[in-house]
């Protein structure tokens, strides 16, 4: 079912729950973007990303992962991570039914990690990845790297990370990205932590980079 509110449409169907942002001048491209472990699709960072992408002509689906659909609060459970990736797959399929061009995929923290794992499992699921504050390892546990899937990743990936993010130092992120056999770029936000903060990311430059990879 869909409810139209200005240029934003709420969607609840096919296991997908979230909001569609409709651009005034659609480019034919799409973006599916999702949230971190402690948040939902109403997160200010996702709102900012969706608004900026929409202004650039992208049709955006800002969605809740299945774990957040099941309960309003609390972190995801590792045994349900595959279900979260299935939810992202459904969201991408939904957007492909709306736009004729390529669909980009990404998210903040946990959402970005699951997006990258899905892309490693299914190489054609997205044209490129937008990974905001990738949780490379738990805070203060740099030995517990979450990069096992990186060698299987064939999708270009744009990492945007704060220089004070406790989940990855700039050097750690650069070293990890180097093992991905696809084009990557790491953009650092000076002084930002894991939440990055509204108004600190040059999203127009991010869309330009994603588009350059598919041209």
Image (cartoon, rainbow, N blue to C red):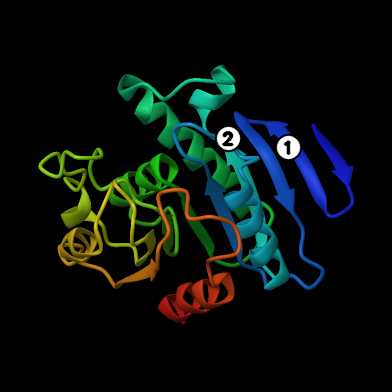
Residue 132 spot, x, y in % from top left = 43, 55
Q: Residue furthest front?
A: 191
Residue drawn at the location 54% of the way across and 26% of the way down: 68
Q: Which of the 4 image quadrants contains residue 3? A: top right
Q: Residue furthest left?
A: 143
Residue drawn at the location 44% of the way across and 33% of the way down: 37
Say above or below: 38 vs 166.
above
| Numbered circles on residues, count | 2
Residue drawn at the location 43% of the way across and 59% of the way down: 192
Tell me if 13 is positioned left or right of 198 in this view: right
Label 2 residue SS: loop
Which residue is the site of mark 1? 11
Point out the tag, 1 or 2, that comes first from the N-terminus.
Answer: 1
> Badge 1: how crowded within 10 Å, few (<14), some, or many (20+)?
some
Q: Nearer the viewer, mark 1 or mark 2?
A: 2
Q: Which mark is residue 40?
A: 2
> Badge 2: how crowded within 10 Å, few (<14), some, or many (20+)?
many
Label 1 residue SS: strand
């Amino acid at each position: 079912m869909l409810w139209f509110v200005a240029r934003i449409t709420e969607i609840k169907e096919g296991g997908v729950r979230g909001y569609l942002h409709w651009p005034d001048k659609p480019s034919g491209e799409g973006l599916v973007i999702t949230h971190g472990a402690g948040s939902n699709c109403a997160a200010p960072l996702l709102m900012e990303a969706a608004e900026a992408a929409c202004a650039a002509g992208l049709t955006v689906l800002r969605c809740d992962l299945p774990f957040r659909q099941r309960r309003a609060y609390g972190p995801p459970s590792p045994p349900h991570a595959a279900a979260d990736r299935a939810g992202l797959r459904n969201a991408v399929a939904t957007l492909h039914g709306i736009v004729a061009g390529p669909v980009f995929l990404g998210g903040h923290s946990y959402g970005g990690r699951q997006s990258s794992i899905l892309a490693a499992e299914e190489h054609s699921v997205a044209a490129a990845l937008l990974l905001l504050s990738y949780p490379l390892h738990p805070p203060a546990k740099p030995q517990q790297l979450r990069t096992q899937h990186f060698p299987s990743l064939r999708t270009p990936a744009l990492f945007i990370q704060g220089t004070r993010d406790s989940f990855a130092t700039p050097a750690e992120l650069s070293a990890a990205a180097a093992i991905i056999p696809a084009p990557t770029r790491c953009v650092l936000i000076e002084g930002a932590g894991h939440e990055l903060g509204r108004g600190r990311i040059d999203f127009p430059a991010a869309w330009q980079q994603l588009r350059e990879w598919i041209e």
